[in-house]
Image (tube, rainbow, N blue to C red):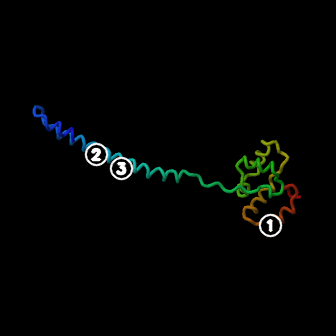
Amino acid sequence: MFALNLLSETANEPNLTWLLWLVLAIFVIIVIIGWMVSNKEEEKVPAKKKEAAPAAPATPDILKKLEGIGPKVESILNEAGIKTFADLAKADVEALREVLATAKLQMMDPSGWIEQAELAAKGDWDALEKLQDELKGGRHV
């Protein structure tokens, strides 16, 4: 308002009140556009976070319940990304042998682990127990 009064009181200079109103209107429009753009960006960010968020990791199973797997082998499998019975059931025997060989446990035979893991992943504990009675060190005898 002071600027408007100052501009209107000068008699020798041309009336520049319209210029001040124009600048004020442009400023208000810029503020409104900036506010609208920032709201749209805020709405987009949570949607991207929800899409990019990985699924909650499955609770690790106690792989030592399987015949032939002890605490050391369980920790090696966990480090290799095999943390559940389902992970072990999907694993390839040769890939398991490579993991064991890397850990210098090439004498271990993972061939019986997958069959046990399939039963454990299904929750068929009776069949698993029956199978484990037939195994020795995780191997068929």
Residue that lies at the very extreme toward the top in this rendered image = 12
Query: Which secondary structure lies at badge 2?
Result: helix
- Mark positioned earlier in the residue sequence (3 or 1): 3
Residue 36: numbered disc: 3
Within 10 Å of the Cα at label 3, are there few (<14), some (14-19), or many (20+) other Cα atoms? few
Structural crowding at the residue carrying mark 1, measured as other residues with C-alpha within 10 Å and reported as few (<14), some (14–19) or many (≥20)? few
Task: Residue at 84% x, 49% y: name it.
Answer: 108
CA separation in Å, label 3 and label 1: 62 Å
Q: Amino acid at mark 2?
A: Val
Indicate which disc, 2 or 1, sits on the residue closer to the N terminus: 2
Number of the front mark, 2 or 3: 2
Report the residue marked by disc 1: 127
- x, y percent for residue 15: 13, 37
Q: Nearer the viewer, residue 84 or 15?
A: 15
Residue 131 at x, y percent in the picture: 83, 63
Q: What type is the residue that disc 1 sits on?
A: Ala
Q: Is residue 54 left or right of residue 133?
A: left
- Real-space CA distance between mark 2 and mark 3, rounded to the nearest whole angstrom: 12 Å
Q: Quadrant of the C terminus?
A: bottom right
Q: Amino acid at mark 3?
A: Met
